[in-house]
Image (spheres, rainbow, N blue to C red):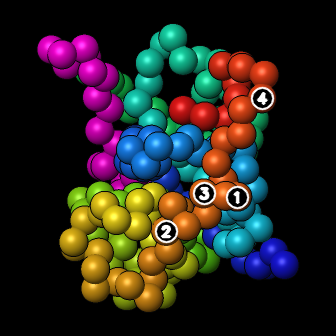
């Protein structure tokens, strides 16, 4: 049963994607978007992501799945790894949109978001803190156990199942 609320999700895509990959599986972003809507009444899902020009087909697919993409410029580090830190943008957008949603879901295991999660909880605007990996997340969140859920617990429902390969297959 879909909650009849006006709820938004704010998703740290890098933390989500890397945490899931670290566990040996890939998230099906299309299924995850449906899950957010069905379970938490999410009408807007903001996905904060570093912008890499060669990934345009992925961005198009994510938008088709119902995500609102908020891009952060990226840097290529000396070892070739691409870095796009989205923390400030996620917090800023959660506050810009504050009056527009009833409650929020924050998707991250990064303790840099503790102040936002704590504030939303005190204002009764936090539905859930969704942490990608039950076994690896910031200790700052340990006092919020009743507000947390773990995406790793839903692997059977949210894991990307191989089908014909496509750059628009729902994975990052």
- Whether 102 is drawn above or below 84: the answer is below
**Mark 2 and mark 3: Cα distance apart in space:** 10 Å
Precedes in sequence: disc 1 or disc 4: 1
Disc 1 marks which residue?
A: 157
Secondary structure of residue under mark 2:
strand
Instruction: Compare marks 2 and 1 and give the one earlier in the sequence.
Output: 2
- Which residue bears the numbered disc 2? 150
Determine if the magenta segment contains residue 86: yes
Give the mark, 4 or 3, whose residue is nearer the N terminus: 3
The residue at 40%/30% (across/down) is 50
Secondary element type, mark 4: loop
Can the viewer see residue 94 in this picture?
A: no
Q: Residue at (72%, 20%) from the top-left corner?
A: 165
Q: Which mark is residue 155?
A: 3
- Do residues under tags 1 and 3 come within 8 Å of each other at their CB atoms? yes
Distance between the alpha carbons at the discs numbered 4 and 2? 26 Å
Q: Give the x, y percent position of residue 66.
A: 72, 45
């Amino acid at each position: 049963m879909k909650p009849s609320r006006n709820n938004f999700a704010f998703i740290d895509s890098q933390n989500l994607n890397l945490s899931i990959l670290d566990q040996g599986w890939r998230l099906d972003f299309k299924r995850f978007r449906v899950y957010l809507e069905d379970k938490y009444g999410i009408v807007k899902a903001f996905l904060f992501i570093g912008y890499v020009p060669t990934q345009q087909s992925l961005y198009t697919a994510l938008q088709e799945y119902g995500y609102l993409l908020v891009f952060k410029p990226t840097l290529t580090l000396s070892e070739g790894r691409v870095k796009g830190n989205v923390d400030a943008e996620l917090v800023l957008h959660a506050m810009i949109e504050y009056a527009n949603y009833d409650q929020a879901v924050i998707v991250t295991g990064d303790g840099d978001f503790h102040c936002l999660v704590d504030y939303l909880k005190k204002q009764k605007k936090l539905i859930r803190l969704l942490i990608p990996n039950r076994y690896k997340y910031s200790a700052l969140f340990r006092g919020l156990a009743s507000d947390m859920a773990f995406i790793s617990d839903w692997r059977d429902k949210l894991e990307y199942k191989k089908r014909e390969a496509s750059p628009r297959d729902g994975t990052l």
